[in-house]
Image (tube, grey):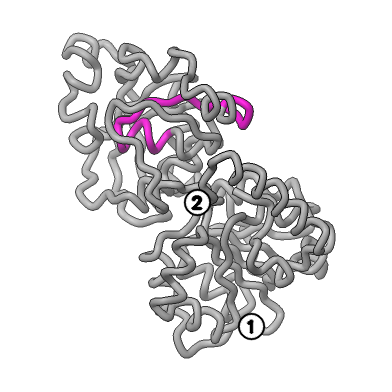
Amino acid sequence: MEPLDADSYRQLWINEKDYKMNEEYVGYLADAGAVRTSNCAPYLTGWIPLKGQHFITTESSNVLLCNSLFGACGNPEGIEASFWAAICGRTPKYGRHVAENRIGTCRVYVDCPINTHTEWELLGYVVGSIAPKSSVPVLIGSFDDLDLDKFKHFSAPLAVVSDIDMCHVLGITPEAPTLEAAFGSMAAADASPSFHIVQRDIDEARAKFCSPASGKVGSVNLGCPHYSIYEIKDVAMALKGKKVAPWVHLHIWTTYSVKAQADRCGFTKLIEAAGGNLLAGSCPCYVFEYPETKEKLIGERLGVVFDSIKLSYCMPPCYDKSINTYFGEPMKCLAAALDGFWR
């Protein structure tokens, strides 16, 4: 990811000097053979390690997703380790690169409906809050409609609030077709500690990230992790023929290649006609670091809206406590953008 949208940095009030510096760094990497994707969900661009393959990535939610959903093998490494691996073509064999470290260590029974994007976000937070440190949870429940986008939204909060970097979903993820496979044996499965998640846990988690009072909002942010083309389509259709409140900044974040697809499909035009912005390459975590950008987005001390627990968890320290933070379903966030109020 980059600290700006290189195509729309002026829209974000980012100066020419910072833009050129970013281009210089990215150009240096490109000369060394890197491919510029600039996103936190590289599987949206075709970067998909297969079961048993080894990978390195700096994005915590991507580590968890690739280990869990794809069955690939990787650890939460940093920027330096990624460069070393790219240069050497090797990485130390430890952690999730070793088969015996990938088996389940605890059972998590999910005894409530988990269907929507937001419910998967909340489930990720709750699992991260109750599962033991460094564990490999095995989720047991009814998850018939789980897809890549929902697992993406599950992975981000789980990775942020815990050190968990792998999670099996019984009957769905590659290494957990059965309990015996997930734990290495039935004896190990039966002996593992168990936890239960009920609706009250999900409801209490939601309340932690959303200010209780209604209020006027100035900044609405969707797309952490970056939105897929299908999520952008939903946003575009919801905004068709409508107008964002004149004082609201609506930002939807994705990767450059997905934005190009959205341009071609006409989704970008619909979003922009409504007064929103489809942006790429970065996210609020980075653009809020630019003082002028931050002042433009929250200078009037209006509420800030996210559809992401990761941002609702990480962003409030970037602004003062007088600003309300609201978290909710994407369509509720869009309703706040159109109305200018969170109700």
Q: Amino acid at mark 1?
A: Ala
Mark positioned earlier in the residue sequence (2 or 1): 2
Q: Is residue 180 left or right of residue 317?
A: left
Which residue appears at 52% of the width and 75% of the height? 335
Q: Position of residue 45 (x, y in %)?
A: 41, 52
Q: Position of residue 120 (x, y in %)?
A: 39, 48
Determine the image quadrant of residue 281: bottom right
- Point 35% across, 36% down: residue: 49
Q: Give the magenta-colored segment's residue range.
A: 64-81
Q: Is residue 310 magenta?
A: no
From the image, which quarter does the C terminus lie in? bottom right
Q: Label 2, label 1: how many angstroms apart (C-alpha)?
A: 25 Å
Tag 1 secondary structure: loop
Residue 245 visible here = yes
Per the image, the residue denoted by label 2 is 225
Tell me the number on the disc at residue 245.
1
Nearer the observer, 233 or 140: 233
| Foreground of the two, 36 or 272 | 36
> Tags 2 and 1 in contact by the CB under 8 Å rule?
no
The crowd level at tag 1 (other Cα within 10 Å; few <14, some 14-19, many 20+) is: many
